Amino acid sequence: MDVKMKGITALHTLLQFLLFSAIFPLSFSAQPRNAKKLSSDNHHRLSSSAVFKVQGNVYPLGHYTVSLNIGYPPKLYDLDIDSGSDLTWVQCDAPCKGCTKPRDQLYKPNHNLVQCVDQLCSEVQLSMEYTCASPDDQCDYEVEYADHGSSLGVLVRDYIPFQFTNGSVVRPRVAFGCGYDQKYSGSNSPPATSGVLGLGNGRASILSQLHSLGLIHNVVGHCLSARGGGFLFFGDDFIPSSGIVWTSMLPSSSEKHYSSGPAELVFNGKATVVKGLELIFDSGSSYTYFNSQAYQAVVDLVTQDLKGKQLKRATDDPSLPICWKGAKSFKSLSDVKKYFKPLALSFTKTKILQMHLPPEAYLIITKHGNVCLGILDGTEVGLENLNIIGDISLQDKMVIYDNEKQQIGWVSSNCDRLPNVDRDLEGDFPHPYATNLGIFGDRCPASYEETD
Ligand SMILES: *[C@@H]1O[C@H](CO)[C@@H](O)[C@H](O)[C@H]1NC(C)=O
């Protein structure tokens, strides 16, 4: 099974970190080059955004990524976008386990380790017992994902250039992880990506850091195309003025991921027994996961509905747990749409709020020409009672995580086109997204604005 789940993290401290101190001795102690925090007055003045082109797909790749420039001179890193976790990390050029990239694509710390007294360091620890014995010690982190993959490393701080919609390129110094020990969960082959871009709302996320530097409103969103690709944005410039369905974030949700609910499952316009679902919106998960009970109900509803139709179970397709084959092999979802009914999630607090899940939002066509159910049993893979809306169900929607107003929104969108930002562009800047899209590569525009 090509199932990947980045989101929903747990962090803990490990004594093995001592190992890293041996590898990166004192020479890597951070130098206190503080990114100066702007006064909170700036938050009102600013409303600029940055947009990034997204690559990837649900199947066969199982992930969506952005290319992020990091460092000075900058190098490009392909990072898995993950609204289910906080910490951004890249594979580290250090004696490294589970680093899959060639050496020249690894991140090399350069006297820029974050010290353990740094406020952000406590944010990447799970254990309350974390102690910073000596202030200029390095800041170790470990992040563990729902699919039991993990990354262990050290926090660094470096320049990440952002081109904003107003035309300015700003390169704040941002803290992120340099991961030197990665584990990938059993069934997954090591990913093609260089790391993870955590979009959660914890203080350590890039989103929160850009926000506290006064550069953007605390809003992030993505639009993942069913044809592959799409875009990601920080800030609120791209939020359409109408048509969005907003639902409030659950206060109970940890700050590290975004959840909403309770919701009920609607099958072909009719209420079902599936009610009271709390749902985590997780771009780091390829598929959607329901707890066993809800999952079984979905399987029963779909199977029941397929009775008498020309689909047979395809037990020989290893792609996903439940697949069907037709008389002829299927080429695209349009070949099977007629066999499947639309689902919807109805957010019951405010009756009319629904997230529509047409067949495209819960089915894939495999390379074997079968159609498979992209809603999986979360309990079976260790998620217990959690329910996760993954990429498959987020496709062709603009999804917005608005931490300012504590709400999550979505609207059907064409994610193949970058949104029009003309209204905010200044002068004759030719390539508004040039930096973010990696077009500058190693070259840096002379007009970088320093934030510190
Ligand atoms: C453009 O927006 C960025 C980020 O909010 C800000 O730092 C910069 O000063 C703005 N540039 C101009 C010319 O307003």
Image: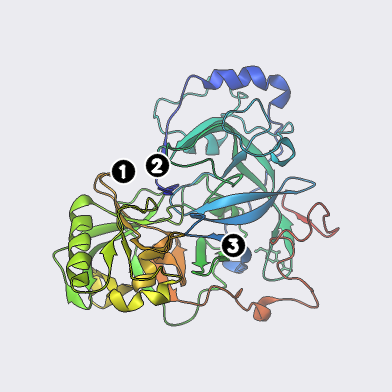
Where residue 381 is drawn, which disc sits there? 1
Label 1 and label 2: CA atoms lie apart by 8 Å
For the residue marked with disc 2, what is the amino acid?
Asp
Label 1 and label 3: CA atoms lie apart by 28 Å
Q: Above or below — where is 151 with respect to 162?
A: above
Task: Tell me where residue 92 sits by quadrant.
Answer: top right
In this rendering, would 286 be left or right of 259? right
Q: Which residue is mark 3?
A: 54
Q: Tell me the residue at 60%/54% (across/down).
A: 210
Q: Which residue is mark 2?
A: 147
In this rendering, would 445 be left or right of 285? right
For the residue marked with disc 3, what is the amino acid?
Val
Asked if disc 1 is less than 8 Å from ligand 1, the answer is no
Q: Tell me the residue at 62%/79% (across/down).
A: 420
Q: Above or below — where is 452 with respect to 137?
A: below
Q: Residue furthest left?
A: 273
Residues packed near mark 1 inside 10 Å, few (<14), some (14 to 19) or many (20 plus): few
